């Protein structure tokens, strides 16, 4: 069984930042490339020749228009998932807007939490 773990950490010594849950994925994950970030919980990716809008599972972020923090959630997700990042997906379902709902795993070098002093 292929196990992939995404473990974003929160630096409790610094200013509050995004808190993301530990997600343990069992089973094969699909590789994809980030094309853009829509808001704090929506990412557009390419998977081969397909372009897919992903709604991140287990995360409910403010919409970009929800001032004053909506734009901040988008900016933070763009920092974690810059355009061109390679990610793995574990698709769960489709939502009522026909977006793919998936768990997403990104690997950064060095990890963002280390660059922020975590």
Image (spheres, rainbow, N blue to C red):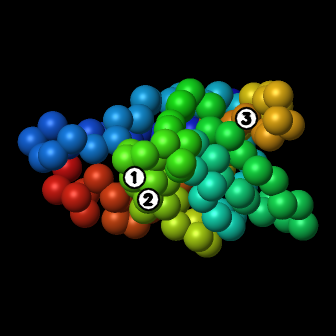
Query: What residue is rendered at 73% in x and 59% in y?
Result: 45
Quick check: marks 1 and 3 in contact, CB under 8 Å? no
Using the numbered discs, state the Cα–Cα distance from disc 3 to disc 2 in whole angstroms: 21 Å
Residue depicted at x 53% and y 32%: 59
Give the secondary structure at mark 3: strand
What residue is pinned by disc 2? Answer: 75
Circle nearer the N terminus (1, 3): 1
Where disc 1 sits, the SS reads helix
Per the image, the residue denoted by label 3 is 101
Q: Earlier in the sequence, mark 3 or mark 2?
A: 2
What mark, if any, has residue 57 been given in the picture? Answer: none
Q: Given the current orientation, which residue lies at the most extreme left position?
A: 13
> How far is the residue under mark 1 from the one under mark 2?
5 Å
Q: Residues within 10 Å of mark 1 (few under 14, many from 20)?
A: some
Q: CA distance from mark 1 to mark 3?
A: 22 Å
Query: How far from the left and from the top, in percent, is residue 94?
Result: 82, 31
Q: In this rendered view, identify the residue nearer to me: 30 or 71.
A: 71
Q: Is residue 95 visible?
A: yes
The answer to whether the residues at label 1 and label 2 have Cβ atoms under 8 Å apart is: yes
Q: Which residue is mark 1?
A: 72
Of residues 58 and 117, which is closer to you in this image? 58
Asked if the residues shown at circle 3 and circle 2 are in contact, with their CB atoms under 8 angstroms apart, the answer is no
Q: Residue at x 72, y 46 (%)?
A: 54
- Where is residue 109? Give x, y as percent: 40, 66
Q: Is residue 87 visible?
A: no
């Amino acid at each position: 069984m292929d196990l992939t773990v995404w473990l974003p950490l929160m630096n409790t010594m610094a200013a509050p930042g995004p808190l993301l849950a530990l997600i343990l994925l069992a089973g094969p994950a699909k590789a994809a490339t980030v094309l853009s970030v829509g808001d704090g919980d929506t990412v557009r990716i390419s998977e081969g020749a397909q372009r897919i809008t992903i709604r991140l599972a287990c995360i409910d972020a403010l919409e970009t228009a929800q001032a004053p923090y909506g734009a901040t959630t988008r900016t933070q997700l763009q920092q974690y998932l810059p355009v061109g990042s390679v990610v793995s997906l574990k698709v769960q379902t489709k939502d009522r807007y026909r977006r793919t709902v998936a768990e997403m795993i990104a690997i950064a070098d060095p990890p963002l939490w280390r660059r922020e002093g975590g």
